[in-house]
Image: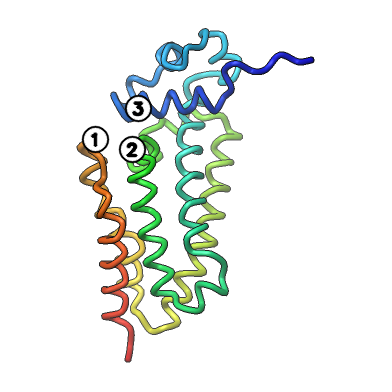
């Protein structure tokens, strides 16, 4: 029988994310992550050829987690079409809840992809990141089209979907303090209010 893997890649990525959330990108070294996970240095290099591949894994884990959360909250195209404004509120609140529940991942995501030296990532990881973004953009475009079909101006849709949700959590993440539990519902209310206010009657 094969011996169980003591330090799987996910544990190592989670250790890297925790280090980043506490101390920033400079703290995420192969040696520091191995120590945080209680793994030998060899385990790191066996699973990640270099720091670039580790940084890519951190980014991909955070992005996929957020995308899955928002996607699950919004649902399919049929659900979006029923009430796109409510769907937008759900998406915005889901992002806020994700930041409350997964603050370390949120700090990784909100630093932006450029913070993780993407030019050092293996080509396969760069392609995975692009594919992940394309898939999310395709789903988000369904919501955007549904909102525009109601007559809401594009500038208002962009503000509600892109700017308001991030603005609601950015300050807390930048200061490395917890996002208050009340923030997701505040974000939802703000997004729904601005969209309803600009919906033709």
Q: Of the two numbered discs 1 and 3 on the same chain, state the one appearing first in sequence.
A: 3
Q: Which residue is the site of mark 3?
A: 20
N-terminal label among 3 and 2: 3
Tell me how far mark 1 sits from mark 2, CA to CA: 8 Å
Q: Nearer the viewer, residue 149 or 39?
A: 39
Q: Position of residue 92 (x, y in %)?
A: 36, 60
SS for tag 2?
helix
State the residue in front, 55 or 10.
10
Q: Residues within 10 Å of mark 2 (few under 14, many from 20)?
A: many
Q: Mark 1 and 2 residues: CB-CB less than 8 Å, in contact?
A: yes
Is 5 left, or right, of 2 in this rendering? left
Q: Label 1, secondary structure: give it.
A: loop
Furthest residue toward right: 1
Q: Position of residue 15 (x, y in %)?
A: 44, 23
- The residue beneath circle 2 is 107
Disc 3/disc 2 C-alpha distance (Å):
8 Å
User: Which residue is depicted at the point 52% across and 57% down?
Assistant: 72
Q: Position of residue 184 (x, y in %)?
A: 31, 56
- Density class for disc 1 (Cα within 10 Å; few <14, some 14-19, many ≥20) is some
Which residue is at 47% across, 74% downward? Answer: 145
Q: Quadrant of residue 171?
A: top left
- Proximity of marks 3 and 2: CB atoms separated by less than 8 Å: yes
The reply to whether callout 1 and callout 3 are in contact (CB within 8 Å) is no
The label number, if any, that marks residue 176 in the structure image = 1
Q: Quadrant of the C terminus?
A: bottom left
């Amino acid at each position: 029988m094969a011996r169980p893997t003591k330090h799987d890649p996910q544990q190592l990525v989670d250790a890297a994310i925790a280090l980043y959330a506490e101390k920033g990108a400079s703290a995420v070294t192969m040696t520091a992550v191995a120590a945080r996970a209680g793994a030998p240095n060899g385990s790191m290099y066996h699973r990640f050829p270099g720091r670039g591949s580790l940084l890519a894994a951190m980014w991909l884990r955070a992005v996929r987690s957020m995308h899955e959360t928002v996607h699950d909250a919004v649902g399919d195209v049929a659900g979006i079409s029923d009430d796109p404004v409510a769907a937008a509120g759900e998406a915005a609140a889901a992002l806020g809840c994700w930041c409350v529940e997964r603050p370390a991942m949120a700090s990784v995501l909100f630093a932006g992809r450029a913070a993780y030296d993407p030019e050092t990532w293996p080509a396969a990881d760069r392609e995975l990141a692009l594919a992940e973004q394309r898939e999310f953009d395709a789903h988000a475009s369904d919501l955007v089209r549904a909102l525009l079909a109601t007559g809401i101006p594009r500038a208002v849709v962009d503000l509600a979907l892109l700017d308001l949700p991030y603005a609601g959590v950015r300050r807390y993440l930048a200061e490395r303090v917890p996002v208050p539990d009340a923030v997701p519902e505040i974000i939802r209310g703000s997004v729904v209010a601005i969209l309803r206010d600009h919906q033709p009657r």
